[in-house]
Amino acid sequence: MGRIGSWGLLLCLLALGGTDLRAQDSVDVAQLRVLEADITTFYQQRQIERIAAMLDEDFVITFEDGSTYSKTGYISYNAMPSVKVAEAESLDIKVRLHGNTAILTGVYHERGEDKGKPYDLRDRFTDVWLKKDGKWRLIASHYAVPVKP
């Protein structure tokens, strides 16, 4: 095969490989959207063990007030009986893939009671997921209150 034919074959193989990557990206994006919805539902329903199973051992979360928690601290925080979540939802989610790392951004809304007092939160969030051993794990979360105009 001539030099031009070899380059043509190589380009065809790369194009086919790119098709497989795009298909895998679509599968990953769909999985991540489901995982994001699941973790929100598990939080609302106080399914602590299910949340823990989704978090990487190195997980860290930063809340609106600047406080941070590790995986253990976050699990303890979720187990506090004083907080009763009536509604939790993640909206307008954007997924960006970078190899085995995914960055999800969106809008988070939560309504409920804390120590008997009602609250209604509307935040922006960034979640970072890492694919390890074929499974997506949440490794970092950051929540921020949007600036009002």
Image (cartoon, helix red, strand yellow):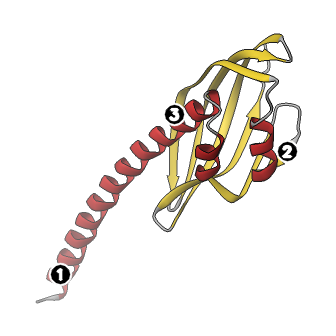
| Residue linked to disc 2 | 68
| Residue linked to disc 1 | 4
Q: Is residue 35 left or right of residue 42?
A: left
| Extreme residue in the front direction | 81
Residue at image x 82%, y 24%?
82
The residue carrying pointer 2 sits among few (fewer than 14), some (14 to 19) or many (20 or more) residues within 10 Å by Cα, namely some
* Vertical position of residue 31 compared to residue 57: above or below: above
Kind of residue at badge 3: Ala
Which is in the foreground here, disc 2 or disc 1?
Answer: 2
Residue at image x 58%, y 45%?
50
Name the one closer to the observer, 56 or 3.
Answer: 56
Please identify the quarter of the rendering in which residue 34 is found. top left
| Residue linked to disc 3 | 37
Secondary structure of the residue carrying tag 2 is: strand
Question: Reading the chain from its start, which is encountered first: label 2 or label 3?
Answer: 3
Residue at image x 49%, y 68%?
133
Question: Reading the chain from its start, which is encountered first: label 3 or label 1?
Answer: 1
Disc assigned to residue 70: none
| Extreme residue in the bottom direction | 1
Provide residue 7's location: percent of width, then percent of height: 22, 79
